[in-house]
Image (cartoon, rainbow, N blue to C red):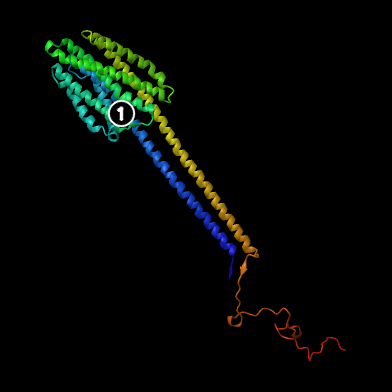
Amino acid sequence: MSVSVNSRRTRLRSALAVLLTVLVLLPAAGLLLRVLQENSKQRDNVQLEQDGTEYLNALVPLISALAESQSAALQGVAAEPASVTAAVSRVQIADDKFGKSLETTSRWTGLKAKIAKLPAIGKGTAKIFTAHVEVADLTLALFDTVRENSTLNRDPDADIWFLQDVVAEQAPVAVTAVSRMSDLANMVVAASSKTREPLKLQFAYQVQKVQEVVGDLTDGLQEAVNDTNSDTLSGNLVSNLDSFRRGIEAANRGANFGAGKPDVSVLVTAQSTLQTALSALSGVVLKEMAGLLDDRSDTLTYKRIEAFAVFGVAFALIVVATLWTRGRARQVQAALSEQPGENRRDVSVQAAGATGGSAPANPYGNNPYDQAPSYGEIPNYGGGRERSGAVR
């Protein structure tokens, strides 16, 4: 039986190489898992924001259609405008698609039922106006629900945050305030002296509201342009923002606040101009938001692929290094087994006779005169005289 010290060392080195490989791969795999988890979380969040943007795209026309419905109802038109029917249908499609993830279905179902009841309100200016105000407020609340549940209002990028604030907060409020301001102007002109003062207070409040929201909207768009990476945002906003500002200037002239009665005809024209401008402006803002979110989604997808690629390359290199090390260790072990050197220690145990083994061959042959003397034995030369093979 032979035992090689170098063989033991070689096997030990091979085992250490495998152990080190495992110790390197496990932390690397853990790091990759954490990167992928964070990447998946960000991708899910971006998808939720994209769902919210698409829902807002369907919701924006509804607020303008409701403003149109309010004005028509106050003028005695009982039938629901075609724009309301089309807008409700678009929002229903969006809610069927995203209502579960955005948690809007319950709120939209209640709002839809109230919109359906508007044509059946009956006569009475105050009653009609109050019913439309309630529906518009519920629609604004739905805007808030979408932006909150889609996390658009918590977006980390400044440009997307300001854009969503404009399209989901400032623009709908501006449309609603301008519509109420115009309709209240008509109501003030037609009211009796007894009911005019309360209406004038409401009219004054809506005039002030329009001024505030227009300032917030303009500032928000400017902040978005200053902080965006989009090459098209600024150019696309310029013409639509100019149209919006001209509509506001016309609305202020028609309101004629503090200088006499409001000019209803000017206000009606300004309302139509503002609704068109805000609709176009909202379309541009939503398109820019969708583009920015698509870019972010593409970046996250690239980072995911990059993480897999880096881990794959690292894994391949480690495996190759391990296999090379083990192969080299086998070569060394084979060389040592073929050429025993000074570092090899052999221990042999031989048994003769009882073990059935044969005695080693006598190197001196079978001639009795050629027998090798035993260790310690003094050869007998016949009385001490020298023996010679020659005859004297």
Q: Is residue 164 above or below residue 324?
A: above
- Residue 245's image quarter? top left
For residue 149, side relative to residue 199 (left or right)? right
Number of marks = 1
Q: Which residue ends up furthest to the left in the rendered image?
A: 194
Q: Residue at x 62, y 68 (%)?
A: 345
For residue 68, side relative to residue 333 (left or right)? left
Q: Indicate the secondary structure of the residue bearing disc 1.
A: helix
> Residue 24: where, in percent of width, then height?
49, 49
Quadrant showing the N terminus:
bottom right
- Please state which amino acid type lies under the numbered disc 1: Tyr
> Residue 152: where, in percent of width, then height?
33, 30
Q: Which residue ends up furthest to the right in the rendered image?
A: 392
* Residue named by callout 1: 55
Q: Residue at x 41, y 33 (%)?
A: 297
Quadrant showing the C terminus:
bottom right
> Residue 23: where, in percent of width, then height?
48, 52
Q: Residue at x 27, y 27 (%)?
A: 143
Q: Nearer the viewer, residue 137 or 162?
A: 162
Note whether residue 51 is visible: no
> Residue 267: where, in percent of width, then height?
25, 11
- Residue 272's image quarter? top left
Q: Is residue 53 above or below residue 265?
A: below
Q: Is residue 280 above or below residue 349?
A: above
Q: Residue at x 57, y 59 (%)?
A: 10
Q: Which residue ends up furthest to the front in the rendered image?
A: 258
Crowd tier of the residue under label 1, counting other residues whose Cα lies within 10 Å: few below 14, some 14–19, many 20 or above: many
Q: Is residue 128 above or below residue 327?
A: above
